[in-house]
Amino acid sequence: MSQDQHDLAGSHYDLVIRGERVLTSSGLRPREVGVRNGVIIAMEPLGNDLQADEIIELADDETLIPGLVDTHVHVNEPGRTEWEGFSSATKAAAAGGVTTILDMPLNSIPPTIDVEALDIKRDVARDQVHVDVGFWGGAVPGNVDKLRGLHDAGAFGFKCFLLHSGVDEFPPLDPDELEADMRELATFDSVMIVHAEDSRAIDRAPKPDGDDYAKFLASRPRGAENLAIAEVIERARWTGARAHILHLSSSDALPMLRSAKHDGIRLTVETCPHYLTLTAEEIPLGATAFKCCPPIREAGNRELLWQGLEDGTIDFIVSDHSPSTLDLKDLENGDFAVAWGGVASLQLGLSLIWTEARQRGLSLETVVSWMSEKPAQFAGLTGKGRIAPGYDADFSVFAADDAYIVDVTKLHHKNPLTPYNGKALAGRVRKTYLHGTEIDFTTPRGRLLRRGMAEVG
Ligand SMILES: [Zn+2]
């Protein structure tokens, strides 16, 4: 059928997915979802018998959920492609039900700190992405005059650090530079996303040493995170700019975040599966797969982070997928002082959070809202994060009661290391659709996104 006939017929679709459990804006419902040209056109009661070129009937144990949106992924290509690349990262995303990622501006070379670097990233990503990909810009000392250009070129916002980032080509801002950049971002209503650990506090903390995780944890104290978050809150208060706290680990910061939001400061907060599912107490000697910054903290801290999610102080959950090569994780010595800090988890986020959340009596709707709708809203991705008419036909078919054991050799991300290897998880993604087409891991059909619009990549 031609496109004109499609439009005239009005009731014929490219794809219809039918099932007893479709996660709609009003909860799980028996629905038929009609897709045309990659967009959801119709949502009708199951039994209405919508007609399509391709019809998918969900099995009894399957739920159709919106594609997840992960706004915190380090792809590292070009420059450190041996750590992770666009092809492997987007396959891992797709296998985990993630249909949109936003790439962080550092660890690639060049870092995304001007329009030329953004263009280089886009050129290398184009034609190899299996999910939709957008880009954050970077705020570093001396590039305040580049921020507007990056914004106009489609950067979703700007990341900065308040201490050494781990790579020398992406230096941190001091608090006054942070404020100056936030004043600039406020003029075009962009957002500053901050790695909030205070360099002065880290410098004065005991140094990490050897294979004992407790020593590493002591080297990244909650106080360093709390101090940096307080700084971000006040600079946001003074400038009126939007600010976002990346990867919240310290539960001590929850009361001040709650209070800042109550004051009307334009502030959002994310946390990650590793802070919500792992605890410092269980990390084995020398297990550097668990090393990340800020660090995974104690079991009691984890409980408070879950409460922060449930009461809305924490807005959503993203991966902070930040892998490296195996040699940089110092696996032979297991020295937390020298290993690269970053956890690889892009493919596992939904199962990790679902496994933990269901034990806490939380619903799949709530979990998916934290991992899809809320991050999409935060990033201004107006066509993502919901199964509703007018939204992109990005879905995954999720078997919530399936269980599996994580086998790192079967994950798609480039370097086979993750702290979750061997872990038993509930909930498996069986298929993922992007723009109404099932992702086949062979033909890259992802698009490169610009803030506020889609670019056919
Ligand atoms: Zn990160």
Image (spheres, helix red, strand yellow):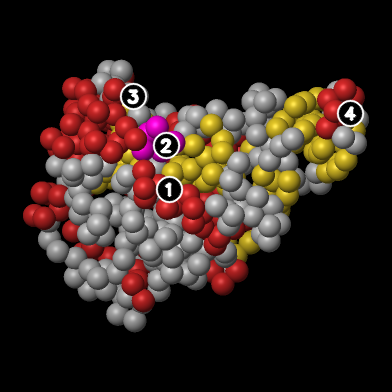
| Labels 3 & 2 near each other (Cβ < 8 A) | no
Q: Quadrant of residue 266?
A: top left
Distance Cα–Cα, label 4 vs label 3: 43 Å
Distance Cα–Cα, label 2 vs label 1: 9 Å
Question: In the visual, does 141 lie left or right of 336?
Answer: left
Provide the major secondary structure of the magenta segment: loop
Marks counted in the figure total 4
Q: What residue is pinned by disc 1? A: 119
Distance Cα–Cα, label 3 vs label 1: 21 Å
| Labels 2 & 1 near each other (Cβ < 8 A) | yes
Q: Is mark 3 within 8 Å of ligand 1?
A: no
Q: What residue is pinned by disc 2? A: 153
Distance Cα–Cα, label 2 vs label 4: 37 Å
Mark before the other along the chain sequence, 4 or 1 = 4
Residue 384 location in percent, x, y? 58, 33
Q: Residue 188 shows which numbered tag? A: 3
Task: Check disc 3: other Cα within 10 Å, few if <14, some if 14-19, many if 20+.
Answer: few
Distance Cα–Cα, label 4 vs label 1: 39 Å
| Labels 2 & 4 near each other (Cβ < 8 A) | no
Name the amino acid type tagged 4: Gln
